Amino acid sequence: LEKGPENWDKATLGFVTQKCSGGSASYEETGVVRAANTFATRMGFGHILAPSGHQNPKDDARLYSFLLRSQSAAVLPCDNDDFPVFDCVLLQLFSDGRVADLYPRRSALCSRDIVAASVHSAPTPTPKDFPVPDQSPPSSPGTLTVVVDPPVVPPLTLDDLPRLTVPDCESPAPHGRAETEDGASSSECSSEGAAEEAGEAATEGEGGG
């Protein structure tokens, strides 16, 4: 991985999946465990963050928020908006073409060096919100293959993944910390809260224009 950190054993791998969207707990758990084992074993990541997948969406969100907030700044620094900055982020893209919901008021997620993604094995429809290249040898330079739900997981070139845009969905359910009106962070995770914040952001945008 030519674009990866020089010291991989100090890298943080953050798993952002569909835990708060009511996805299948068994599928999510299997995918996260398999990917975590693969990365931890083959790349020597020092820290892996993932919700349990055994609880309801709100409890999973609280756990994920706790995992994020419990990391020291040396392990998981934040940007000026107190948003976690991962060394590497694994996003799952499902067959409906939607990227898993992330944080409110965030239209994209960036990592320091690499953004990796897995593609659900369902053959149709092809996701339109993400550049999925044709099949190519996984050993190609600059390619990171993430095997989460085999056998259909096309390799994704790093050059195509500097930034992922997260499209809006009807019932967004953000992971981790949700901003309150006064700017404080909260670990609540609910569709209504995210919708209210989205409406507030839109109102503020119109007022500023």
Image (cartoon, rainbow, N blue to C red):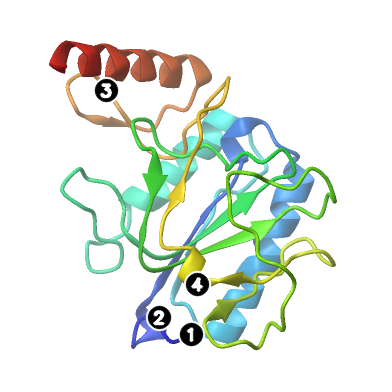
Could you say which quadrant of the image residue 204 lies in?
top left
How far across and how far down the image is residue 177, in percent? Answer: 36, 37
Q: CA distance from mark 3 to mark 4?
A: 35 Å
For the residues labelled 1 and 4, the Cα–Cα distance comes to 9 Å
Task: Give the answer, above or below, for where 59 lies relative to 201.
Answer: below
Helix, strand, or loop for circle 2?
Answer: loop
- Measure how far apart labels 2 and 1 are at the Cα level: 5 Å
Cα distance, mark 2 to mark 4?
A: 10 Å
Which mark, by number, is residue 180?
3
Q: Nearer the viewer, mark 1 or mark 4?
A: 4
The image quarter in which residue 144 lies: bottom right
The label on residue 158 is 4
Q: Amino acid at mark 2?
A: Gly
Quarter containing the C terminus: top left
Q: Position of residue 131 (x, y in %)?
A: 59, 56
Amino acid found under the numbered disc labelled 1: Leu
Around disc 2, counting alpha carbons within 10 Å, would you say few (fewer than 14), some (14 to 19), or many (20 or more)? some
Determine which residue is flagged by label 1.
Answer: 1
Q: Which residue matches tag 2?
A: 4
Q: Amino acid at mark 4?
A: Leu
The disc, 3 or 4, on the residue closer to the chain's N-terminal end is 4
Label 2 or label 4, whichever lies nearer to me, is 4
Does dot 4 land on a helix, a strand or a loop? helix
63 vs 138: above or below: above
Looking at the picture, tell me which residue is in the foreground, 110 or 39: 110
Q: Are marks 2 and 1 in contact (CB under 8 Å)?
A: yes
Q: Earlier in the sequence, mark 2 or mark 4?
A: 2
Answer with mark 3 or mark 2, whichever residue precedes in sequence: 2
Q: Amino acid at mark 3?
A: Thr
Mark 3 to mark 1 CA distance (whole Å): 38 Å
| Residue at horizontal 52 percent and vertical 82 percent from the top | 142
